[in-house]
Amino acid sequence: MAQLELNGVVQRYGKNTVVDGVNFQLEAGSIACLLGPSGCGKTTLLRCIAGFEDIAGGEIRLRGEVVSRAGQRVTPEKRRIGMVFQDYALFPHLSIEENVAFGLGRKPAADAHLRVRQLLATVGLHGQGNKFPHELSGGQQQRVALARALAPRPELILLDEPFSNLDVGLRERLSAEVREILKREGSTAIMVTHDQHEAFAMADEIGVMYEGRIQQWDVSYNLYHRPANRFVADFIGQGVLLPGVVADGTNVDMELGQLVSDTPVECSETCANCADGCDVDVLLRPDDIVHDDKSPLQAEVLHKAFRGADILYTLRLASGASVLSLVPSHHNHAIGEKIGIRLDADHVIAFKKPQDHHHA
């Protein structure tokens, strides 16, 4: 039985539908992430799961039991859910140990003390229990907040943009650390974020949300390499959409040459094979375009971003279209220079071109 199950969940504020028929389930011990731009409904959905908000339609189940449906809601404290917020919400006048113990409520002192000490060791703060929150760094405070949420062994941990107050370098490191801690504790968790690197570092599965709906629920590899629609293709990773025409069912003719696919070209949004002669937009990632001095195909360097081991080039093709290319950084070319490129994509992600009215 799934630890958490959402069936057709809808939430409205007045006439505004913020969550529009969301379905997913989460198995025990799994870490999921709701990823999307601000205003897509992900935080509202998390608040509905926590029990802070009523829902207008559908149902939410925890371990098979309905906790929310229209007009009926089990209160947050009866849901056995742990929450970690972006502002940590630690009590400044309590020590770290007391903050973590607060999550345990009225447990007998000896049991509570042991659990707190174990948790502080688990989150890498062994021996820091007597300090106060202001004596710790932001990353350490976030780990205390996590320990406090984990203390009562909740059925589900909810994390709302937990790293957004921290700098970027720390975010990814902490995402990976928090993932390890949750896995060690055997916790089931859902995190909300707008940062895909955080989602990739943290989650077993990711639901990409937009306009109140889950656009794709998948593992990160598939979101990047097999996006279900244009929104996911655009939101995850970097890339550009370039026009092409399907030929022989498995190939696409493009300005960059012919893109050869080992399977029939499928138009992701229509879920059907694209017929020959079909106009498509093809998603090309920076690693699909290779710098090759021998290639007759030339592109002009418009912009470059040095990344250490490699450089991300923005290149202009003869047609005026731009593409991105990731090139080892010892190939250092000047802006305005022409360089040889070739296509090296092993599978085709194509979207049918929207039909213009004047074609009809």
Image (spheres, rainbow, N blue to C red):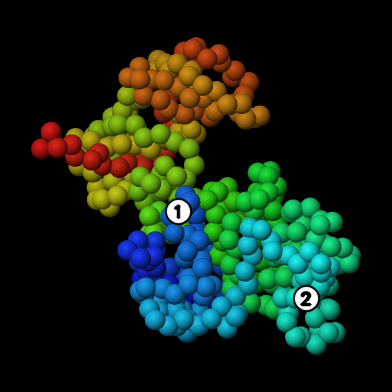
Query: For this rendering, which residue is in front, 259 or 228?
Result: 228
Q: Identify which residue, 84 or 346, lies in the foreground.
A: 84
Which residue was labeled with disc 1? 39
Q: According to the image, label 2 marks what residue?
A: 101
- Picture quarter containing residue 356? top left
**Residue 269: percent from the left, percent from the top?**
29, 49
Residue 108: image location, x then y, percent? 80, 87
The amino acid on which the numbered mark 1 sits, given as a three-letter code, is Gly
Q: Please state which of the two labelled residues, at mark 2 or mark 1, is closer to the viewer.
A: 1
Q: Residues within 10 Å of mark 2 (few under 14, many from 20)?
A: many
Residue extending furthest toward the front? 14
Q: Is residue 295 visible?
A: no
Residue 108 higher or lower than 19, as above or below: below
Q: Name the residue at the bottom extreme.
A: 108
As helix, strand or loop, the secondary structure at mark 1 comes to loop
Q: How many numbered discs sit on the rendered protein?
A: 2
Q: Measured along the vertical axis of the image, is residue 282 above or below residue 73?
A: above
Between 269 and 117, the one lying in front of the other is: 117
Residue at the image point whose x is 69% and y is 61% from the top:
88
